Amino acid sequence: MTPFPEDARPNPFLSQEYEPLNTRVQNASRIEAHSRGIGGMALHMRKQIIASASDDCLWKIWNMETNENIMTGEGHKDWLSGIDFHPAGSHLVTSGSDRNIKVWDFMSSSIAHTF
């Protein structure tokens, strides 16, 4: 196994001071999204949607404003561990314990690639 190289460069942000963020987080709503645990989530870059990947072998996309399920996908044979949107927003990538990575195409509502 190759050791991870050490980084001796100084951290330019270490000595900076930041003003505390004045944020308040609250639970706005609760959704019964999946029948089993959620292994991953992803926020869309430009739209108010979120994707979830679950141990129930499904991924789902949710409208964050209305809490409505927009789309559900199935195709993995075992639990899902990761999920993310393509930067263009036209595809979704999921990974699972079935050792597959799937690229989902929203335009055709199908699996574009399986690795």
Image (tube, rainbow, N blue to C red):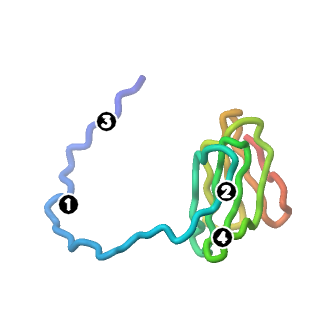
Which residue is under mark 1?
12
Point out which mark residue 5 bears.
3
Q: What is the three-letter code of the residue carrying label 2?
A: Ala
- The Cα–Cα distance between marks 1 and 3, rounded to whole angstroms, is 19 Å
- Secondary structure under badge 3? loop
In-front residue for pair 48/113: 48
| Residue 3 image-quadrant placement | top left
Dot 1, how many residues are within 10 Å of its Cα: few (below 14), some (14-19), or many (20+)? few
In-front residue for pair 51/86: 51
Q: What is the three-letter code of the residue carrying label 1?
A: Pro
Q: Is residue 32 above or below residue 22?
A: above
Point out which mark residue 67 bears.
4
Q: Which comes sooner in the sequence, label 1 or label 4?
A: 1
Dot 3, how many residues are within 10 Å of its Cα: few (below 14), some (14-19), or many (20+)? few
Dot 4, how many residues are within 10 Å of its Cα: few (below 14), some (14-19), or many (20+)? some
Q: State the quadrant of the C terminus.
A: top right
Nearer to us: label 1 or label 4: 4
Which residue is under mark 2?
33
- The Cα–Cα distance between marks 2 and 3, rounded to whole angstroms, is 42 Å
Q: Which comes sooner in the sequence, label 2 or label 4?
A: 2
Nearer to us: label 1 or label 2: 2
Q: What is the three-letter code of the residue carrying label 4?
A: Asn
Q: What is the three-letter code of the residue carrying label 3?
A: Pro
Query: Which residue is located at x 76 percent, y 55 percent?
Result: 104
- The Cα–Cα distance between marks 1 and 4, rounded to whole angstroms, is 41 Å
Q: Is residue 101 above or below residue 103?
A: above
Dot 2, how many residues are within 10 Å of its Cα: few (below 14), some (14-19), or many (20+)? some
Q: Are marks 1 and 2 in contact (CB under 8 Å)?
A: no
Nearer to us: label 1 or label 3: 1
Q: Which comes sooner in the sequence, label 1 or label 2?
A: 1
